[in-house]
Image (cartoon, rainbow, N blue to C red):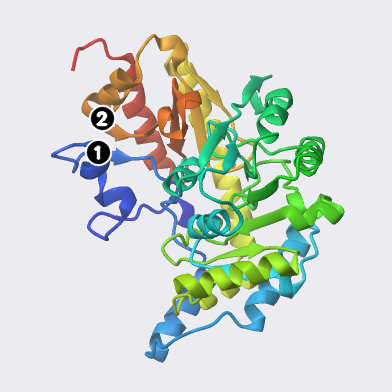
Amino acid sequence: MNSFQQVYDRKNTRSVKWDTLGAIYGLEETSDILPMWIADMDFSAPPAVLKALHDRVEHSIFGYSFMCEECRTAVINWQAKRNDWQIDKDWMLFHQGIIPAIASIIETFTEKHDKIVVTPPVYPPFFQLAEHQDRQVLYSPLVVQNGQYTIDFNDFEEKLQEAALFILCNPHNPGGRVWTVDELTEIIRLCAKYDVLIISDEIHGDLMIGESRHTPLAKIAGSESNRIFTCLAPTKTFNLAGIQVAMIVATDKDKRAKLEKHALAHGSGMLNAFAPTALTAAYNDSEKWLERMLVTISDNIDFASSALEEKIPGLHVMKPQSTYLLWIDYRKLDLTEEEVMKKLLLTGKVALEPGSKYGPAGLGYLRLNAACPRTTLSEGIDRIVLALTSTTQD
């Protein structure tokens, strides 16, 4: 069997996706709910990673571990091959994950009440982390042109004049947009003009659909790369979110020193024993697995988009250029978000993410995770269709 079509029973495995639906959606009974919400795949990790982890377990000792030269070389070689981006090994700082990495950058390089720009609808921790650290969030909403999100650069520039930091989702989550070189260049120009630092979250940068190509922001920034913190991880690419490992790439030596000091102050410098093993096996030996997975994702996206738009008149899917996520526009259905979520959960028995989670600009949208076997996806589509075409009052 094609490994991407094998259905795994993930219930009762301490899976956030499958085992926390009651708490997330406020339901007493969830055994019949199909989860298609949080961004982890229902695919097995690459065989090379599994073998490496099995070998590591069989060693039987799980003492303190560190990210060795092989780990750094694996990241360097991967970025050079996939994105033609040359990274120096000294530019890398390892972290437990993208979210804690972003949190550490915010805390290190901004002060309380500083202003941070985000472009909603966008990954919620961008604005949540800022708010939890008593920073002020400035929203510069994306606009839809020709069926895809783009940046309103007039509004963006206005917001930057007050800001200390901008957090970029590159590629974009939830819209799946792959930013063009021209767009990224303009972001760099404006942030340099107003002396604004940039976090570029590129965790989805390996998940390119079709002919799309990812451009690391720092790659094209020249001397302005010193204002950029690039956050990378193999976890989204290879379905390793539970093995927490990420990197901050920072070209500026002084900024790296400040982040290292922050890590010492918070005791956050050491990673788990499986992180080095998983990272090196993923980047060194799992590229063919990724290419096969991307074909599966592309087919799933085409199937789901066509089925939803055909079977639910008025529904529109913003087909992603990257990620395995569908951003679904239901505004023409004349339903509130509360009504839509109630229909999905109680009639369709399927859990999607409400668009408002990504900020007010997400109202009227749903996010669907298409990284699952076709049988699971087909069942999920049927449940969504049942929910959103039903005339019964729940």
Question: Residue at the location (64% across, 39% down)?
Answer: 163
Label whose residue precedes the other's in the sequence (1 or 2): 1
The amino acid beneath tag 2 is Leu
Q: Which mark is residue 129?
A: none
Compared to residue 314, the image places residue 347 above or below, namely below
Q: Which mark is residue 33?
A: 1
Compared to residue 48, the image places residue 301 above or below, namely above
Q: Is residue 2 visible?
A: no
Q: Residue 174: where, in percent of width, then height?
A: 53, 36
Question: Residue at the location (29% across, 39% down)?
Answer: 34
Q: Is residue 326 visible?
A: yes
Q: Is residue 118 left or right of residue 130?
A: right
Q: Secondary structure at mark 2?
A: helix
Q: Is residue 311 left or right of residue 35?
A: right
Q: Nearer the viewer, residue 341 or 65?
A: 65
**Residue 392 quadrant:** top left
The amino acid beneath tag 1 is Ile
Q: Quadrant of the N terminus?
A: bottom left
Q: Is residue 112 left or right of residue 29?
A: right
Q: Is residue 21 left or right of residue 131?
A: left
Q: Residues within 10 Å of mark 1 (few under 14, many from 20)?
A: many
Q: Residue 214: where, in percent of width, then height?
A: 72, 47
Which residue is identified by label 2? Answer: 345
Q: CA distance from mark 1 to mark 2?
A: 7 Å
Tag 1 near tag 2, CB within 8 Å: yes
Question: Residue at the location (66% across, 82% down)?
Answer: 69
Q: Residue 62: where, in percent of width, then height?
A: 39, 86
Q: Nearer the viewer, residue 109 or 355?
A: 109
Which residue ends up furthest to the right in the rendered image? 222
Q: Secondary structure at mark 1?
A: loop
Q: Residue 232: where, in percent of width, then height?
A: 61, 59
Q: Nearer the viewer, residue 61 or 33?
A: 61
